[in-house]
Image (cartoon, rainbow, N blue to C red):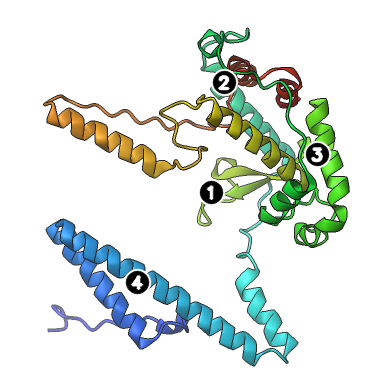
């Protein structure tokens, strides 16, 4: 008996990791998992709808339970600064960094630079002359970026996520709080950039931080890192102003690529999936074959040819100081 069924020790799972998880939520979670198994087995649309309904309700219930839990915890600890600090620290502090490696800033700079150079060398040479824009000859040109009022700058400042970069002189949250007092100066800087077609040198700087792609990866392997560029808060405000004007220009003149789904108002990956699905259904109804080719570009944004990008902007009617701003 001992050979066939030897005794083994089973470690009991600790269910106290989520203190807001009540018995009712646990029962709902069991029902949700049961519905998921049922749908995976049957593949029926009705079972999928039932599963999604339970999933949506469970997510809302968990969010409500967590909110109530921490609200009560903060109220009971209002007179104890140490407890308040511990609560906020557990919620806001990032996870512990990985073990330090011997990699230096020079190592990362060399690796990323050579990586982009190797990728670019595989491309065929592209023409640098401006692309013809005869197909857009009837549209008005965007020769000058419009200056903005203080109210628009204030609205953009308050709507931006207050992430602070080491390049910022003060924390972004404080800047948002005192922005009404600084508004005339911020507006002057932004409008000066728009009118001159020049981006301030300080706004072109970024703090590049290498981050492990996954926490479990080897921190000594430089290929396991991806670079993240942190920009100053004021530069993001300027970029948002220009982005709004460029988007309005492209939208009003119907210059967006009809197949574009990303970085476009009212479009997303879901829009792209719906378009592909519709074409597949149409091909199937017509008894045609379909071939789907998916491309995953390595360092896609880093390998965009700036000359080609500026040439494309010219082809869309962007010229004058407006084009000079992008070139800057």
Question: Reading the chain from its start, which is encountered first: label 3 or label 1?
Answer: 3
- Local crowd at mark 2 within 10 Å, few (<14), some, or many (≥20)? some
Give the residue number, with chain letter if any, for mark 2: 120
Q: Nearer the viewer, mark 3 or mark 1?
A: 3
How far apart are the alpha carbons under marks 3 and 4?
45 Å
Question: Reading the chain from its start, which is encountered first: label 4 or label 2?
Answer: 4
Q: Which quadrant would the C terminus be assigned to in this image?
A: top right
Q: Quadrant of residue 143?
A: top right
Q: Quadrant of residue 193?
A: top right
Near-viewer residue (274 or 233): 274
Near-viewer residue (40 or 288): 288
Q: Tell me if 295 is positioned left or right of 204 in this view.
A: left
Residue 10 visible: no
Label 4 element class: helix
The residue at the point 55 percent across, 13 percent down is: 138
Q: Nearer the viewer, mark 2 or mark 3?
A: 3
Q: Tell me if 9 is positioned left or right of 137 in this view.
A: left
Label 3 element class: helix
Give the residue number, with chain letter if any, for mark 4: 57
Q: Which mark is residue 213?
A: 1
Q: Which mark is residue 190?
A: 3
How far apart are the alpha carbons under marks 1 and 2?
23 Å
Q: Are marks 3 and 1 in contact (CB under 8 Å)?
A: no
Q: Are marks 4 and 1 in contact (CB under 8 Å)?
A: no
The residue at the point 63 percent across, 31 percent down is: 246
Residue 57 on image: x %, y %: 35, 71
Label 1 element class: loop
């Amino acid at each position: 008996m001992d050979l066939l069924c030897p005794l083994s020790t089973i470690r009991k799972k600790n269910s106290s990791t989520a203190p807001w998880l009540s018995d009712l939520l646990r029962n709902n979670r069991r029902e949700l998992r049961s519905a998921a198994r049922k749908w995976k087995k049957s593949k029926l649309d009705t079972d999928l709808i039932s599963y999604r309904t339970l999933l949506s309700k469970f997510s809302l219930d968990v969010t409500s339970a967590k909110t109530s839990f921490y609200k009560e915890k903060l109220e009971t600890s209002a007179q104890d600064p140490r407890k308040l600090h511990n609560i906020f620290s557990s919620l806001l502090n990032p996870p512990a960094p990985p073990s330090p490696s011997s990699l230096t800033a020079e190592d990362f700079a060399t690796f990323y630079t050579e990586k982009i150079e190797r990728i670019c060398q595989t491309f065929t040479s592209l023409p640098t002359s401006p692309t013809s824009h005869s197909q857009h000859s009837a549209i008005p040109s965007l020769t000058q970026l419009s200056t903005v009022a203080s109210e628009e700058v204030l609205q953009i400042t308050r709507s931006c996520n207050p992430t602070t970069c080491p390049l910022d002189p003060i924390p972004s949250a404080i800047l948002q709080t005192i922005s009404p007092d600084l508004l005339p100066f911020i507006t002057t800087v932004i409008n000066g950039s728009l009118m001159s077609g020049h981006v301030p040198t300080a706004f072109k700087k970024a703090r590049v931080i290498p981050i492990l792609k996954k926490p479990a990866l080897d921190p000594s392997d430089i290929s396991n890192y991806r670079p993240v560029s942190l920009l100053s808060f004021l530069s993001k405000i300027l970029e948002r102003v220009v982005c709004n004007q460029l988007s309005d220009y492209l939208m009003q003149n119907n210059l967006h690529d009809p197949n574009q789904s990303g970085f476009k108002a009212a479009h997303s990956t879901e829009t792209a999936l719906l378009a592909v699905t519709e074409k597949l259904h149409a091909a199937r109804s017509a008894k045609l074959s379909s071939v789907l080719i998916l491309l995953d570009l390595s360092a896609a944004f880093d390998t965009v040819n700036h000359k080609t990008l500026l040439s494309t902007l010219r082809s869309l009617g962007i010229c004058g100081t407006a084009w000079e701003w992008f070139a800057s």
